């Protein structure tokens, strides 16, 4: 892939950014080639590989170095062709500055996006928490449990969860409020059933204890006394 030995512009960047720029290999004519080498050597970018396969993009040549309409062509498929003997003279071209500015803007947008995403991830949802149901976090018809008309719901919530209702996200949506009431009714039914069970158990134990006490009482038997003794007692009374 072609790469400019001066500014580092690549063919990939040209295609990606839709730039109207071409790449020109070092000429074979000795005098012209030496002029190119001298220009590159002035910037310290020339090495052995550059001498063999290097190229320079058209952004480093003056307009008069090109045949036809110049280097800023927009017609599809039209090539940037240098005039014979053309030598690069522009070290930092306008296209290079434009590309650097574009890359800088892209990098800035990436950093800003990354910063925003990082803040969204780590910052608490202070604003959103004030506008959604505290259970399901959905925005719906919300009921403020701190208001007087919802005091019964707040009492049920605290009874089930042992959480006191305060001013921090006190809202419940219709669905969660219905589930709260159902849960409270179920718990109350469980408590009432347990109380009835205990009451019946106590009654059963009392009855059983009374029955046991009745069976433990001694039986009193009537004894038959002799007839003579009874008559003597009767005469003595007279």
Image (spheres, rainbow, N blue to C red):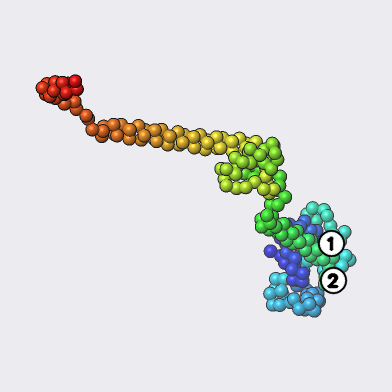
Q: Residues within 10 Å of mark 2 (few under 14, many from 20)?
A: some
Q: Residue at 19% across / 25% down in the picture?
A: 222
Q: Name, please, the residue furthest toward the front.
A: 238
Q: Residue at 71% across / 59% down in the picture?
A: 115
Image quarter in which the N terminus is found: bottom right
Q: Residue at 83% across / 55% down in the picture?
A: 74
- Name the mark nearer the viewer: 2 or 1: 2
Q: Earlier in the sequence, mark 2 or mark 1?
A: 1
In depth, the one of 134 and 188 nearer the eye is 188
Which residue matches tag 2? Answer: 90
Which residue matches tag 1? Answer: 71
Which percent across, then down, holds residue 177?
62, 37
In depth, the one of 101 and 186 nearer the eye is 186
Task: Please say if 44 is above or below 235.
Answer: below
Per the model, the C-alpha gap separating discs 2 and 1 is 13 Å
Could you say whether the residue bearing mark 2 is in a helix, strand or loop?
loop
Could you say whether the residue bearing mark 1 is in a helix, strand or loop?
loop
Which percent across, then down, holds residue 75?
82, 53
Which percent across, then down, holds residue 14?
75, 60
Res 14 visible = no
- Please tell me the numbered disc located at residue 7: none
Task: Please say if 31 is above or below 14.
Answer: below
Task: Please say if 166 is above or below 198.
Answer: below
Q: Residue at 76% across / 61% down in the picture?
A: 108
Question: Is residue 200 rendered to the left or right of residue 68?
Answer: left
Which percent across, then down, holds residue 120?
69, 55
Q: Quadrant of residue 50?
A: bottom right
């Amino acid at each position: 892939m072609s790469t400019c030995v001066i500014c580092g512009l690549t063919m990939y960047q040209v295609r990606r950014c839709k730039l109207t720029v071409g790449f020109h290999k070092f000429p074979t004519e000795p005098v012209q080639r030496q002029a190119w080498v001298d220009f590159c050597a002035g910037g310290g970018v020339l090495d052995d590989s550059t001498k063999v396969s290097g190229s320079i993009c058209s952004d480093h040549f003056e307009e008069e170095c090109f045949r036809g309409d110049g280097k800023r062509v927009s017609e599809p498929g039209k090539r940037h062709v240098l005039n014979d003997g053309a030598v690069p003279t522009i070290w930092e071209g306008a296209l290079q500055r434009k590309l650097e500015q574009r890359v800088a803007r892209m990098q800035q947008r990436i950093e800003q996006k990354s910063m925003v995403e990082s803040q969204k991830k780590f910052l608490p949802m202070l604003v959103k928490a004030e506008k959604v149901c505290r259970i399901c976090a959905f925005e719906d018809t919300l009921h403020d449990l701190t208001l007087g008309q919802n005091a019964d719901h707040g009492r049920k919530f605290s009874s089930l969860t042992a959480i006191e209702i305060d001013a921090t996200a006190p809202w419940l949506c219709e669905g969660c409020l219905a589930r709260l009431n159902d849960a409270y009714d179920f718990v109350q039914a469980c408590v009432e059933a347990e109380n009835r069970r205990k009451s019946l158990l106590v009654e059963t134990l009392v009855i059983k204890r009374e029955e046991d006490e009745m069976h433990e009482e001694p039986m009193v038997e009537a004894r038959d006394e002799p007839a003579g003794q009874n008559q003597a007692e009767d005469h003595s009374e007279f």
